[in-house]
Amino acid sequence: MAHKVFVGLSGGVDSAVSAAILKERGFDVTGVFIKIWQPEFIECTWKEDRLDAMRVCAALGIAFRELDLSAQYKKNVIDAMLRDYARGVTPNPDILCNREIKFGAFARWARVEGAQLIATGHYARMREVAGHLELLRGSDPEKDQSYFLYRLTQQDLARAIFPVGGMLKSDVRKKARALKLPVAEKHDSQGLCFVGDVSMPDFLRRFVDVEQGTVLDTEGRTIGTHEGAPLYTIGARHGFAITDSAAAKTPHYVGTVDATHNTITVSPRIEDAARHTALISDIHWIHREPSFDGEFAVQTRYRQKNVPARLTRSAQGITATFSNAHVAPPGQSLVIYSGYVCLGGGIIQKESATKAQVSLHAGAKKVLRRVQ
């Protein structure tokens, strides 16, 4: 009897081709559209995406089902993301979405419904080595999504398939066209995971009370204004106004964000936004903690190039020491690689992190406005 696999269909081409490949391989395939929470002010894209997912299932001759995870998404992804932005750090909601929704609630529901496996359209690969599973970068370096999957466990990997992980995006498109799939020419989504095409500042303004504040230089002098500290991330160079005539002659980069006092500090030197070390906490290893001998390749943002770093453990967590100063925004994930094998990672903390900084600031609690 063929293995039963539920494919998370987003309405896009990657998941559609994933379903097609699995059917070709002889699996018993069901396409599942996951409905998530969407705020009223965003154009309702999920209905169109659901219709595309249904069309894909009809074209492939596979069953279609729908799963409503809107409450879980709101609580475990959106609310968690808003808490982080309110305290002046930049989280990665796509990592939360994978952990809590796709490989969390969806995977659990699929098992209850009789599926042995789940599949997604992620550009990542797996292999078995010495009795355990390794998560590998996708074959397409421009589309590799292993960064978003670093919090998966051995159990998660054992029950998952990434059918397009060994393909180039161009080949995925070609296959979709050859199969005459209705989403073959559909553009990739660039928005917040499952929410749609909306900028993060516009999204945040609806839920976090922000007000205009001061822009400081590295000497503490006021040189401009900004739209609200929680809207900025380390390394950003847009969205604030330099009103000091001398300073306005050159681009400036955000070096620090202080949500409690509603200030950001900027510098014309991107190096001033960089740091030589990054402390990470909430650490997760896909298999087990490696020996910290030698250098590792680390990635601090999606689609950033790897940089070499050495790792050391302390009571506070793990510190990555970069060979060269590197922009590592607090709240983002620092993901650790050995070659093309993803080992795991953790959440980047603010420099000189203290218990008060790692927890939610009292001041940040005042600016967070939950939406029901």
Image: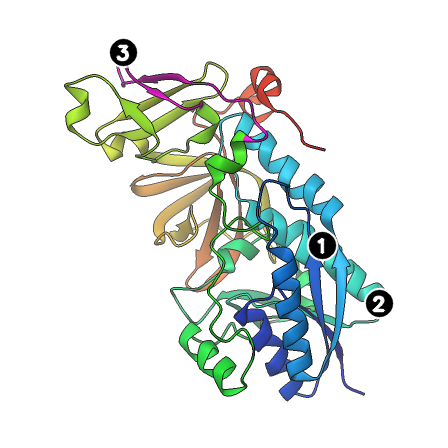
In which quadrant of the rendered view does residue 25 lie?
Answer: bottom right
Quadrant containing the N terminus in the rendered view = bottom right
In which quadrant of the rendered view does residue 251 lie?
Answer: top left
Tell me, for residue 113, which label it has, or none. Answer: 2
Tell me, for residue 104, which label it has, or none. Answer: 1
Q: Is residue 339 visible?
A: yes
Percent of width and height locating residue 250:
17, 29
Percent of width and height locating residue 97:
62, 50
Residue identified by numbered label 3:
221
Q: What SS does tag 3 mark?
A: loop
Q: Is residue 107 left or right of residue 295?
A: right
Q: Which residues are magenta?
A: 206-228
Counting residues from the start of the chain, the first of labels 3 and 1 encountered is 1
Do the numbered discs 3 and 1 sit on residues whose CB atoms are within 8 Å? no
Identity, as a three-letter code, of the amino acid under mark 1: Gly
Residue plotted at (49% across, 36% down): 202
Q: Is residue 23 left or right of residue 217?
A: right
